[in-house]
Image (spheres, helix red, strand yellow):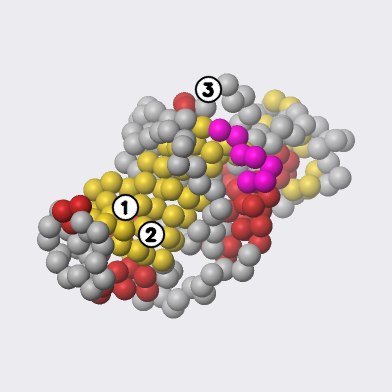
Amino acid sequence: MQLRLQKILSQAGVASRRAAEKLVADGRVTVNGATVREMGTKADPAADDIRVDGRRVEGPERLRYILLNKPVGYVTTRSDPQRRPTVVDLLGGVREYVYPVGRLDYDTEGLLLLTNDGDLAAWLTHPRHGVERTYEARVAGVPDERDLDRLRTGIPLDGRRTLPADVELLTRGRGGPAQAGHHDRQGGDSVLRIIIREGRKRQVRRMCEAVGHPVRLLRRVRIGPLSDRRLKPGDWRELTEQEIAALRRACRRPPAAASPREA
């Protein structure tokens, strides 16, 4: 069966689809001895001799779906030029070429999905699907209702407004319960639950900074239908078949909100 080269390389665990496209563009992929540089080229993994840097690409690897509770101090990548520890360093015993789906900042902790299923990874990261990510953010001071409404309706970042978000004040400064309509911007830290449907760089931190309540601690607690409060930082587990099916269903749902016009 003829498949696009980047899909073949992704299924074989050689690289993510985006990285596979770069391999092709750099002339590092051959099909039956001929170098291929054209995107969209197809081949038959069962019949054609497909090689990357001269090494033959074997058949598809077993698909792995791993949920990791990323600690602070790890970068969300397979390798780091600065030699910082990466999330892959935490996956002892995983031989397949899995890669992170989306990113969590170096100083952010929480749930991260790693897989070698290129199709699912592409669906989860494409903004068109609007898969929700839920964060708990400890912020400085106490956001008032105006601050919360600004976060909900969208914050201009880099000339483009963020998509509408769900924002709830869980606890207010000095450790007291959240109070509707409370406008004390001082006091101690507060905790917000923020649900976003896009993945712009350091988005939650920048949104909170824009309303004057910088993030002190940020944790992702849910990815679409996935959550696991029992998973300790640094630990990981395989997804169940039911969780994988739920993720696929989440990708096929229509977006929760249309993208607003650019600011």
| Residue at the spot of label 2 | 194
Structural distance between the alpha carbons of marks 3 and 2: 32 Å
Q: Earlier in the sequence, mark 3 or mark 1?
A: 3
The vertical placement of 104 against 97, above or below, is below
| Residue at the spot of label 1 | 137
Whole-percent x, y for residue 242 in the image: 67, 46
| Residue at the spot of label 3 | 92
Rendered residue at 41%/66% (across/down): 166
Structural distance between the alpha carbons of marks 3 and 1: 29 Å
In the depicted view, which residue is nearer to us: 9 or 134? 134
Q: Residue furthest front?
A: 177
Q: From the image, state whether disc 3 or disc 2 is nearer to you.
A: 2
Q: Earlier in the sequence, mark 1 or mark 2?
A: 1
Task: Residue type at mark 2: give it.
Answer: Ile
Left or right position of 31 against 169: right
Whole-percent x, y for residue 45 in the image: 81, 37
